[in-house]
Image (spheres, rainbow, N blue to C red):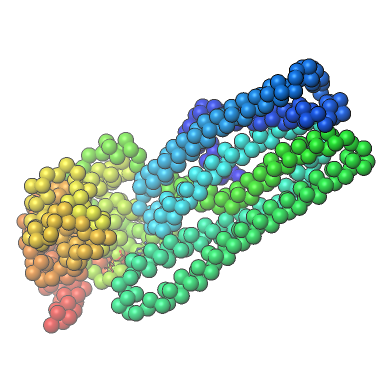
Amino acid sequence: MTYILHFIKNLLSFVGNIIYLNLIGMVLISFLEGIGILLLVPLISLTGLISFNDMGLPINLKWLNEFLINLPLEISLIVVLSIFVTIMVSQGFFQRQQSILNGQIQQSYLKNLRERTYIDFLQSNWSFFLKTRKTDIVTVMTTEILKVSNGISLTLNFVASIIFTIIQVFFAFWLSPYMTICILIFGFGMIFVSKKFIRNSSNIGEETVYLSKTYLAGITDHFNGIKDIKSNSIEYSYINWLEKFGVRFENNVNNLIKLRSSSQLLFKSVSAFLIAGMIYVSILMFKAQPAQVLLVIAIFMRIWPRITSIQSHLEQFGEIIPSFKNLYHLQQISQDAKEFNKSTYENSRPLVIKSGIECRDISFKYNKDEEEYILNGINMFIPSHGMTAIVGPSGAGKSTLVDLIMGLNKPDEGKVLVDNQVLTEDKILSLRKSIGYVPQDPFLFNTSIKENLLMIEPDASDKDIWEALSFASADEFVRNLPHGLDTIIGDRGIRLSGGERQRIVLARAILRKPSILVLDEATSALDSENERKIQAAIEKLKGKMTIIVIAHRLSTIKNANQVIVLDQGRIIQTGEFNQLTLDRKGMFSQLLGKQLEASI
Ligand SMILES: Nc1ncnc2c1ncn2[C@@H]1O[C@H](COP(=O)(O)OP(=O)(O)OP(=O)(O)O)[C@@H](O)[C@H]1O
């Protein structure tokens, strides 16, 4: 319940006073419906079968009776029916207004919740994304947020249902206090007894959340790896996975339907026994008149559905509370991991690096419970406007080191300094705004080449774009595409070759005119002709910006001003390319030797 209350509080602070208008609307509607019960009395009387006096009502409606009796039947019937029609039409009108208002509240809350959650995620630091599965975030942003928003609407309906019930009970109590008390005792007794249904709903809801997350994670993995699946002809192990998973999904929904229908059956059966018992007791034991029996039925038919509705709401709450919990927890984690807000984002300007970036005694580990550091006692200086290459065997910590330099990870010990100033939280964003980054696995969106480039620099002109493309040796192939810059490149750029993708991402990084260019294995997917072109391009950039390259192909970094060799999280060699090749026993020479052997 704490989770629902948290989101209700959000809702109250978001929609403000409209929510009270909404509640007033609900009270008005219930009031008009309550009057409906009262109206039954003169209506029954007008049948001519029974008089008010026989009904044994605790209220004095004789004046109404006398007024109606003194009128000719047609007139009194018209009066009563007109009142009835007016009440029903007004109720319908208010109901319409209230439904519209409810819908508006729900939709604007959903919009706000979606935006807030998305902003929270995007403003979180990198460690949040390292700890959280991407597909869990996607599940929250799609299905869970919708469920929470429906849950909010369910809560508003629940409040309405409670208000309806209270007002109906009030009218019923006025007409017949004993019978109302009797129905209420039975009703709330039933709700208490059927707590098990609510608990089971909650268990099913937990399972639904788990299944949704696992399904999305599985399906995403499978289609990301579809080339491996098809090339290795392992389609059927995945089809089997889906079939098994489908059974669990099916059971989950069937269990929910069974639970809901069992609870409805229970309430319906109790309702039948109760009404039969009441009629029996009133006729045989209290010798009730037909009018009183009719009243018993009328009151019962009004109140019992309200009690059933409360029970059904409670069961639905049980089912969606796990979604509230899931969203709440992920929001909390992302808020704790917040690294900036809108104003810090807007106020941070790209840095211009004058002297260079220094790592001083840096140690870092991903899992803080482990003893071993991934990076250990790193001391290095990356001079501005030079080209620094970081090399080393796989798993040595190259990407981790570059992530620390970009302020994505924070060192557990030691500091990163930019132009001799410690890289504090407030400077991280400025630093990142001055970086052009080309990742190992270049990411492109399923849109045109132009839009992919403008994502980084929305104000760039076509001339700037062609310049950047030409610099990245991508201009020729883009010109040859059927729609040139407007060619749509498919999911993650699937319609382009690996090398073409990498060149587009390089062009995108350069378009920003960054003061630091970070290339993480940027040339790995290029053939030697394109690699040569990019080498020449990087050569052109040397001296204009600070270039950091993580390289496996050592031939690509011949012109680096400094090469840093990492092994098992430690720097083991630093120097110029040629200088390092002279150290025959050093790791750099060994790596170079292995690559030469492999290329023969
Ligand atoms: N998110 C992570 N959580 C836990 N450990 C990680 C994470 N990322 C990397 N590591 C570990 O840190 C070590 C260094 O990884 P890193 O990716 O920095 O190496 P690398 O030198 O860039 O390797 P490669 O050349 O293969 O890309 C590895 O042992 C890796 O298993």
Q: Please, is residue 374 above or below residue 141 in the view? A: below
Q: Quadrant of residue 442?
A: bottom left
Which residue is depicted at the point 73% across and 47% down?
A: 191
Q: Please, is residue 200 above or below residue 27 in the view? A: below
Q: Quadrant of residue 309?
A: top right
Q: Which residue occupies the foreground of this view, 494 or 71?
A: 71
Give percent across and percent down for residue 518: 20, 56
Q: Quadrant of residue 430?
A: top left
Q: Please, is residue 564 above or below residue 358 in the view? A: below
Left or right: where 251 falls relative to 290? left
Q: Which residue occupies the foreground of this view, 529 or 576?
A: 529
Q: Where in the image, quadrant-wise, is ligand 1 located?
A: bottom left
Q: Which quadrant: the C terminus?
A: bottom left
Which residue is depicted at the point 57% across and 57% down?
A: 206
Give percent across and percent down for residue 378: 28, 59
Left or right: where 598 falls relative to 209? left
Left or right: where 357 falls relative to 280? left
Count up the numbered dots.
0
Q: Is residue 127 visible?
A: yes
Give percent across and percent down for residue 264: 69, 52
Q: Which residue occupies the foreground of this view, 166 or 37?
A: 37
Q: Is residue 329 visible?
A: no
Q: Which residue occupies the foreground of this view, 29 or 382?
A: 29
Which residue is depicted at the point 61% across and 40% down?
A: 158
Which residue is depicted at the point 36% across and 49% down?
A: 125
Q: Which quadrant: the N terminus?
A: top right
Give percent across and percent down for residue 594: 18, 79
